[in-house]
Amino acid sequence: MTTGRPLRIGITCYPSVGGSGILATALGEELAQRGHEVHFISYERPFRLATNVPRLHFHPVIINDYDLFKYPDYTLPLSVKMAEVSRDHQLDILHVHYAVPHATAAILARSMLPPEQQPRVVTTLHGTDTTLLGRDPGYGPAIRHALACSDAITTVSVFLQRETQRLLAVDTPIDVIHNFFAPRPPRRSRAEVRRDLGLQDEVLILHSSNLRPLKRIDLLLETVARIHPQESFKLVILAGGDFTPFVDIVRRLGLESRVVVRKNVSDIEVYLQAADLGLITSESESFCLSILEAMCFACPSVARRAGGVPEVVEDGVSGLLVPSLDADAFARAVESLIKDPIRRAALGRAAQDRAREKFSAEIIVPRYEALYRRVCAADGKAN
Ligand code: GMT
């Protein structure tokens, strides 16, 4: 339960499969459990958002399709809905996850309201909103403006804090609040899931991502094709995107019997508890929630040493980090853990301890609450 009066918090995020939406959803649920009123505002109900939870509300943004527009606009209807929810529910805070277009919409929403009805705007940057869109001349100035107008900015890693300062020249202090993951009890047993996947003694390697180019699915497949012996593992890909472009690579590499793809899985815990090893071949990650999800189930990952990943995984202690995007180096690291179940289990235990000590809801959610109270106290709104 919260200390101080419960807050009224609006949260906007992408509702579909993706780390920023998962984090925002979990944060909203945790805040509601701690006694705050939480209002999600998005074009769809976030896919992991529980129903029938006290103090948790969802407000859909309706987008009309006008022939006049070549490209449908989301930012304006979103800002109108944000202003409406802020006014009707007297929001203290509008917390937006992923700057584009959410932060811009929040700033616009706030300026539509009279001063006494304006919520404080907190923007959490998750990754490519800085590292990709922040570099784009068509977006960078708008992102910088929205950040400058936000009452607080957070990033999910020190890496992303520095990149935001470097690429967007932001003067406002940026708080680093790492991600957390609050696993739900799996709805099926490990043995059952492994049986369904056709597994016997093979090591289950798990990859979970939206499959975008930055995730380097080509390298992931190239890596597993180089693991010896091939019969020692199966790779399960939890795909939050279209896998069709990679089917030919699977065929060319002769991986048909080694790779299982599951699409748009919402109860990822079912697979996390069945996995032995995570494999992430992304060029960069500001944090990599997928690694943390696996850590919570004592499953260590092999990943590239880049971006914010070293803040999550200590190389050789709670996982293995590979210095470059090299399929052989990834394959040797994975192979070493396939062959050494005792080391794998030790890394997994350390990963789980680290997840609990550094990246649990108990540690992270109070940091967001403290931030909300700080920005509200700045104008005497909530104490
Ligand atoms: O930034 C993105 O590409 C999308 C975003 C998402 O919604 O999954 O991913 C980012 O946010 C996640 C949650 O904070 C992080 O775990 C991911 O590392 C980060 N992705 C990148 O930095 C590429």
Image (spheres, rainbow, N blue to C red):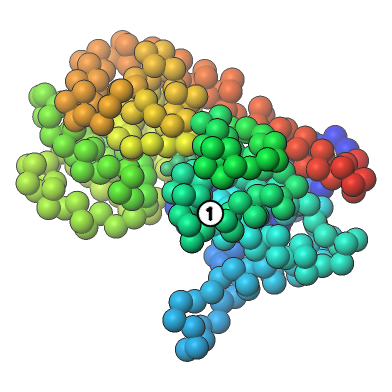
Q: What residue lies at 56% left-to-right and 29% top-to-bottom?
A: 158
Horizontal side of residue 167 vs 78, given as left or right:
left
Q: Is 363 rendered above or below residue 314?
A: below
Mark 1: amino acid:
Gly
Q: Is residue 203 in view from this perspective?
A: no
Horizontal side of residue 188 vs 105, given as left or right:
left
Q: Is residue 283 in view from this perspective?
A: yes
Query: Which is nearer the eye, 280 or 342?
Result: 280
- Quadrant in which the C terminus appears: top right
Q: What residue lies at 32% left-to-right and 43% top-to-bottom?
A: 215
Q: How many marks?
A: 1
Horizontal side of residue 66 vs 122, given as left or right:
left
Quadrant of res 288:
top left
**Label 1 SS:** helix
Residue that numbered label 1 is attached to:
140
* Residue 6 point in image, percent of width and height: 84, 45
Q: What residue lies at 53% left-to-right and 54% top-to-bottom?
A: 140
Quadrant of res 58:
bottom right
* Residue 48 point in image, percent of width and height: 53, 51
Query: Which is nearer the eye, 140 or 78?
Result: 140
